[in-house]
Image (cartoon, rainbow, N blue to C red):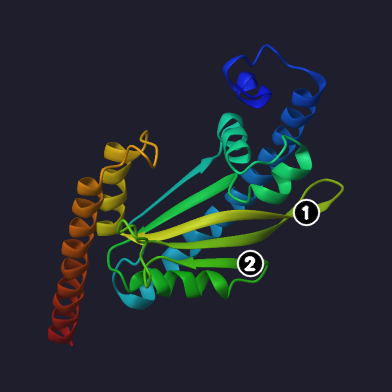
Amino acid sequence: MTDEKKQVENPCLEDDKFKSFKGGYIELSNQARAAMNILLARIENLQLGMDAAQERTLIDTVTHRIKTLESCIKKLCRRGYELTPDNLRDYVKDIAGIRVVTPFEDDIFIVADALKNQSGLTVRRVKDYVTNPKENGYASLHLTIEVEVFFLNEKVTVPVEVQIRDKTMDAWAAIEHICEYKCSSEEKSPKALSLFKKLAEYLSSFRKTAIQLRDLNEKKKK
């Protein structure tokens, strides 16, 4: 067992190295929380404006979280990085995470474009698993957004990961999390992978039909 894993299981065994890492985590998580709060306020304002402009709801739910110390340690260990504050800053860009769930698939890109056009926000990375889902069927749009945060004596730029998905993608991810979250890649059976792909295909067809029904209804209103 590595020293880092021992620290996770035995937090009382805090040597100087771990104390330094933990101090770095506390500083970065505080910055991440501040950045997340700023972005949550921006998303709320966008929601109000977009709902009025579109005459329907474009954002269904918004959830958020701060990655725990234990999760950060596991991520760095999994990737083979030493537990240092610098590595935490350089290689864990999702300490702050926000999930936005939309009613329809095409709403995902409307919300993403609105965020990209916000002043004080810079989109540094985009992972489009909506257009190109993962092998198991996972679909979502991931944005790494840098947020300017002003503290008493300094300004820092902090990354926040924003995942945008529609309701069906969120339902698929919830089922996958329940069934597969604690399984290693070796434990995941080919049969389960096949079933998850099949479920994703059903939901993809459902999304297309739902958009057609929505557009038909909006055309009828006009």
| Helix, strand or loop status at disc 2 | strand
Q: Residue at x 67, y 49 (%)?
A: 91
Q: Do residues under tags 1 and 2 come within 8 Å of each other at their CB atoms?
A: no
> Of marks 1 and 2, which one's residue comes earlier in the chain?
2
Residue at image mark 2: 124
**Which label sits in the foreground, 1 or 2?**
2
Q: Estimate how packed mark 1 is, as few (under 14), some (14 to 19) or many (20 or more) residues with alpha carbons within 10 Å.
A: few
Q: In the rendered image, which residue does mark 1 sit on?
A: 156
Quarter of the image for the C terminus: give it. Answer: bottom left
Q: Where's residue 25, x and y in %?
A: 70, 35
Residue 54 appears left or right of 212:
right
Q: Which residue is situated farthest in the top direction here?
A: 12
The residue sitting at 61% across, 68% down in the picture is 123
Of the residues shown, which amino acid type is indicated by label 1? Val
Q: Residue furthest right?
A: 153
Instruction: Name the one closer to the observer, 117 or 92.
Output: 92
Where is the N terminus found, in terms of image quarters?
top right
**Alpha-carbon span between mark 1 and mark 2:** 15 Å
